[in-house]
Amino acid sequence: MGTLTHLDRLEAESIHILRETVAEAARPVMLYSIGKDSAVMLHLAKKAFYPAPLPFPLLHVDTQWKFRDMYALRDKVAAEPGVELIVHTNPEAAERGINPFDHGPLHTDLWKTQGLRQALDAGGFDAAFGGARRDEEKSRAKERIFSFRTAQHRWDPKRQRPELWSLYNVRTAPGESMRVFPLSNWTELDVWQYILAQGIEVVPLYLAAPRATVERDGLILMIDDDRFRLDDGEVPALRSIRFRTLGCYPLSGGVESEADTIEKVVQEMLLATTSERQGRVIDRDGGDGSMEKKKQEGYF
Amino acid sequence: MARLDSEQDLIASDIGAYLARHRDKKLLRFITCGSVDDGKSTLIGRLLYDTRQIFDDQMASLEADSKRVGTQGKQVDFALLVDGLAAEREQGITIDVAYRFFATQSRKFIVADTPGHEQYTRNMVTGASTADAAVLLVDARKGVLTQTRRHSFLAQLVGVRHVLLAVNKMDLVDHDQDAFDAIVAEYRLVAEATGVGQWSAIPVSGLSGDNVAARSEAMAWYQGPCLLEWLEAVPVDAASEAERPFAMPVQWVNRPNHEFRGFAGQISAGTVRPGDEVRILPSGRKTSVARIVTSDGNLSEAVAGQSVTLTLAQEVDCSRGDVIAAADSPPQAADQFEASLVWFDEEPLVPGRGYWIKLGTQTATATVQPPKYQINVNSLEHLAAPTLELNAIGVAEILCDRDLVFEPYAREGAAPNRVLGGFILIDKSSNATVAAGMLHFALRRASNIHRQHLDVSRETHARLKGQKPAVLWFTGLSGAGKSTIANLVEKKLAARGRHTFLLDGDNVRHGLNKDLGFTEADRIENIRRVGEVARLMADAGLVVLTAFISPFRAEREMVRAMMPPGEFVEIFVDTPLADAEARDTKGLYAKARAGELANFTGIDSPYEAPEAPDIRIDTAAMSADAAAEAIIAALESR
């Protein structure tokens, strides 16, 4: 065996982070959002603790507006032996009928941000793994691998703990918690390359297929079920599209594409001229610096 | 940009071949450092742009931002690409370490962008701790500054072995060779003074991209590599680790059932194969490796950097914090060290206070002796210092409460022992990471003073007295009633035939501790000595009562840690400050308020109330006698 490639080193670092958390935290949990990054993180966790079953549950904070294909994969993962999945839906959002069509940014705040906080508090979790990467967004680039959150789940960029070498300070007082990002140093290309190399199953929506769509505000939206509200004069059209990121389907813009294999997706991505998060409405709600603000409020 | 365009061609024509090549790339981590206006963010922005990491939508928002808040007039301000946080963009500064990613044909890079302000030395040390190389920026107009010297010293301290001096803004000195040569000559002196071994210098312009990703036409007099070529050629530290003797700190014991017991960890050095003889440290027990277990089957070999799970041939004691190492050249274990420390916290080092030390996967309690000296990072002078403040760097002795497996951090002519030589200190009450350290060597005296084995054990002492020893630790404000209640408790215990002794704060300060004052350091030493005396008395089988303000949580926890579990009983005599001050039985509050008594707890020195005392006495709700009865009742139910 020669020296390690960059993917070998990334894998080893992520496994180290996962084990360090499990060794030191009292009650860890893994945020599972069903996307490709979650799929890689889950795969790494299985490797880290093999042959033991996962020493923590998975948590899906459900907004009830994910793509049907996502729910299908989630339920398949939950049925695997040794996997425990907790699904949380914010009862307040459900009661008020919050949806992406009528409520705009409130939809994300109530279902995702508040829902996540409720689920973490209810489970008494002191460490939560997330699949975020530093290459995704500018404020992520400055976030630690072990990101300290106050008892109110707030992120304070000026109170982050210095992280040296591979030494992580996982200590928290009661009520405080850590968000842990094992994929911090992975790029989008690394994630795809690893999915290819390891044969990891991802939601089929990442691959191009003909889908019923409308174009709205510059985004191509998929009509995934009959809850989708068409505007006056809007007519669904069949387009060959795929998704670069997955979230609530009425908020996720697809891209027109013929890439029906992962290799072709990577090819398109490398030749692409727009960044990965461009198809996401959520990052731009609230203008410049909005992700930084959401994180301070407790968003992942 | 010819070679990057050819990458694009390969992607378009044969994605399979491109992916195969990318898969085999090696990783180089480097840091960039420079002072506030050296154009560091601009240079990184330029690297990302020239290696095609910037997409159209990012470029569009960059152009819009450049017009709105940029500092380059009508030109694109690349710095805005990397100055990520809203707070930074408003103030035009970089406040934290940011990590960026890019790749070329042969390598993938992770850049730690570390700010140059003096108050953020800790960020540079953080970024440098994982770096193979450092890119030091200087402004061609300003030359070598104090900061340049500081950055060189820090890079060398943390063991970054390859340094590049990037003389930036060459466009502003008309690409003049003499200006460049003068700066290089000046830096040679700095490199010698700071101990930087291998370094090179390149004239660049981040703004125009000259000598960044391609050789500059404007500086034909420069014949060396451009910045990107230099980065592609620097040796990677990780490559040399596989040749060393094997070592792996145990992170987690994998025990899903009775048949399997595996030891999970990341190999810090060397190579391991099934059948290899190993030792478990610090116990020194010898065994051999049975299997290297992964979910893809057993491996025949694993090397430094890999995260693996090992099973051992014999059932030996091995848990988190132990190190599995090559049997014939294992690392040493010791409990006292000399180390370099970089202080990170607003609250200065308190010599004698107990901090958590985390070294590899080992955690212990450590106290730091008063520093031998502090290093002025600008002049490199050694200065006397009673403590270390935020961003200070010094050398001190560290005493741990148990043996730690370690290796000296620095290695002559080789990459440092990051895993077993680097450590952090954590404040026990705030949980903040307050310092990073690099071990120099173990102190001899630890190994020469052995504990004497005593034939009459503490259990025998306790049995002879027919009681369970305990330390009843009364804490609370001055005038709360600690001594009064402790006296009553001792009388009641004596009446029940218990063997007791009361250590009173004022009395001890007349004798054992009369050399101590009331500064923070002296108060800690006061409590440490009382703790040790209380422990000796508990060893003799006594029920010890102590009445000390003991205002700091960390010291009370230090004393708790000296005793066997359950023997330390923290009793919080809880009186509101206003009540204690109104009572003022010794007239001390009046003096403190008048400014005649400095460092008085509750007035100009804090009292950290226990978060979870074993017993809490609310003096507003019960009399001293009722409090004493409550304490006796609580003790008897133990």
Image (cartoon, rainbow, N blue to C red):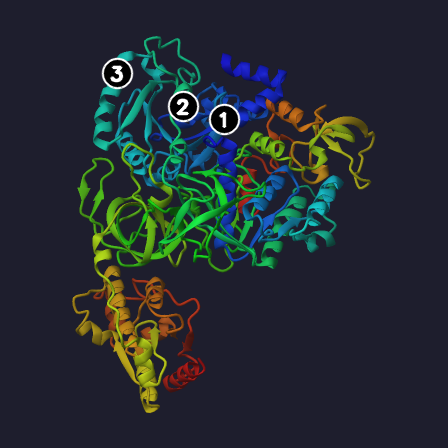
- Say whether marks 1 and 3 touch (CB < 8 Å): no
Q: Which residue is mark 2?
A: B231
In the rendered view, tell whether residue B171 sits above or below residue A175.
above
Q: Chain of mark 2?
A: B
How many angstroms separate mark 2 from mark 3 (CA)?
22 Å
Give the camera-side residue of B131 and B520. Answer: B131
* Distance from the alpha carbon under mark 2 to that under mark 1: 13 Å
Is B379 positioned to the left or the right of B255 in the image? left
Nearest the viewer among B292 and B609 is B292
Counting residues from the start of the chain, the first of labels 1 and 3 encountered is 1
Confirm or deny contact between disc 2 and disc 3 (CB under 8 A): no
Q: Amino acid at mark 3?
A: Asp
Picture quadrant where residue B487 is located: bottom left
User: Which residue is tagged 3?
Assistant: B181
Residue B559 lies, in percent from the top left, at 32, 67
In what element is the residue under mark 2? helix
